[in-house]
Image (tube, rainbow, N blue to C red):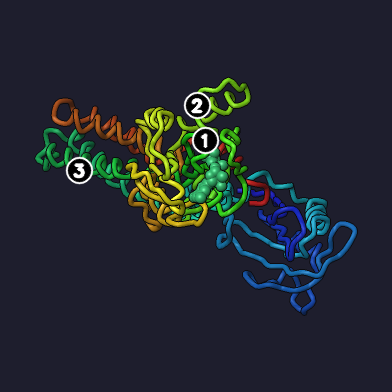
Amino acid sequence: MKSENIAAVSTPAGRGGVAVIRLSGDSPLCVAEKMFLPSGKTKVADFEPYRMYPGEIVAEGFKDYGLCVFFRAPHSFTGEDVVEFHCHGGTSIARGVLSRALSLGCRAAERGEFTKRAFLNGKLSLSSAEGLIDMINGESEAEVRAGYMLYGEKLSARADAMQAEITELLAGIDADMDFPEEDIEHTDLKDIGSRMQAVADELSGMLATYGTGSKVKEGVNVVLAGRPNTGKSSLLNALLNTEKAIVSAVPGTTRDAVEGSLEIAGVRFNLFDTAGIRESGNEIENIGIARAKSLIEGADLVLFVLDGTEKMSTEDREIYEKLADKAKIVVSNKTDLAGDSGEVCDIRVSAKTGENIRALKEMMLEKSMGGYRADAAFLIEKRHYDALSAAFRELEEAVSLCGGVPLDLLGVHLKAAWDKLGEISGKTATEEIINEIFSKFCVGK
Ligand code: GDP
């Protein structure tokens, strides 16, 4: 099939050491012949693949000294012939090199078009492409690690293996139905039932990782709650190691939620400070209070901060009761001051001296992502969770019907599960899903 030459700047716009302009299609080397003057004797047409050649890049209106490299199909990122120009990293330089490629007949690549071509040419699965975008967009180490696992086809390999098992089961059922009278070994229903259950169990194990996985992707939302002056803003600063929130000895100064993020074991935690939840006649403070309530509702974890030098007040108790169903850590602050109240808490810290802040961070990780292991595989994408959930439901249905209905009806559910599993790698994904995924990419990837 013919594939048009496309071109894009693959590095971000701005100043930097190097910018890369990438061309992919049937004949990018023919384009390179017209815009690259090698310093050495080898002509562009004779370039050995995967080797960098120095020379002059002829851009639109100027030249630059740079490098050119050719990747031969199918051993390239897109699976097509690819050429890269490495010029100096300036916005105008990169734009000029791209313009030249476009005036020589290349079309400007769409968002994610290189990766889409790689997918369509069988170089990577759909979930691998999603892993790649997760890595690129990842704002924490944990997200990059999870994206890397997807990119490395860890998930699609498991989905493919389950599909293979279902294919075998379907083949057995088909044989049974095609030759019911023959003297062949008839399908053992018990065996089918337990094999379907085994696949369902594996799916259920994978689905259970989504709770942690979605937090890896989105970050853990932590809200600091407690009455005014217990030290929430100071604690937020101690956790973030900055002076972001306003700290003041006058109660009620933290009127709005202040946001900041930190990484614990590579996982991103988004911190929100709240104004004390209390009845107030002050309108601005009331807005803050309403916001605090809605923040607490959406929080994955609440740090309920007490002033460790004082007994719990009625106000403390009221706030505490509102947190009844929430994952929370009761933090008794101000251990540096004399006169510990002796109130029950999960941890005693001092926002001022930093005492026990590290232990608090560990507790936050444990409470929100219990048993998190950096090398474990998680479902991080809702699309994957939805597809695997649907496959799981079909298998459960098949297991519950097993023995009570004709075999072909089991086959219908198995086939539906197979289709859903195929959405992971993209074998059975619709055009719409595929386009939506690649539209999330940036131009040049
Ligand atoms: P918030 O209203 O809960 O956000 O409380 P702030 O963070 O504004 O702190 C209230 C007051 O307590 C300020 O004067 C802080 O300096 C003080 N404070 C906060 N944490 C500590 C601590 O660990 N030790 C001591 N000694 N003072 C603290």
- CA gap between label 3 and label 1 equals 58 Å
249 or 226: nearer the viewer: 249
Q: Residue 228 carries which label?
A: 1
Badge 2 marks a residue whose secondary structure is loop
Q: What residue type is labelled 2?
A: Arg
Q: Residues within 10 Å of mark 1 (few under 14, many from 20)?
A: many
Q: Nearer the viewer, residue 239 or 40?
A: 239
Secondary structure of the residue carrying numbered label 1: loop
> Residue lying farthest left?
183
Question: Residue 54 at what x, y percent from top left?
Answer: 75, 74
Q: Which of 10 and 254 is in front in this view?
A: 254
Q: Position of residue 195 (x, y in %)?
A: 20, 43
Rounded to the nearest angstrom, the CA distance separating label 3 from label 2 is 57 Å
> Residue placed at 34% from the left, 45% from the top?
342
Q: Where is residue 435 in the image (x, y as percent from the top left)?
A: 57, 38
Look at mark 3 in the image and give the residue it sits on: 195
Q: Does the residue labelled 1 lie within 8 Å of ligand 1?
A: yes
| CA distance for labels 2 and 1 | 9 Å
Residue at 69% from the left image edge and 71% from the top image edge: 47
Q: Vertical placement of 386 versus 260: above or below?
A: above
Amino acid beneath label 3: Arg
Mark 2, residue position: 278
Residue at 55% across / 33% down in the picture? 275
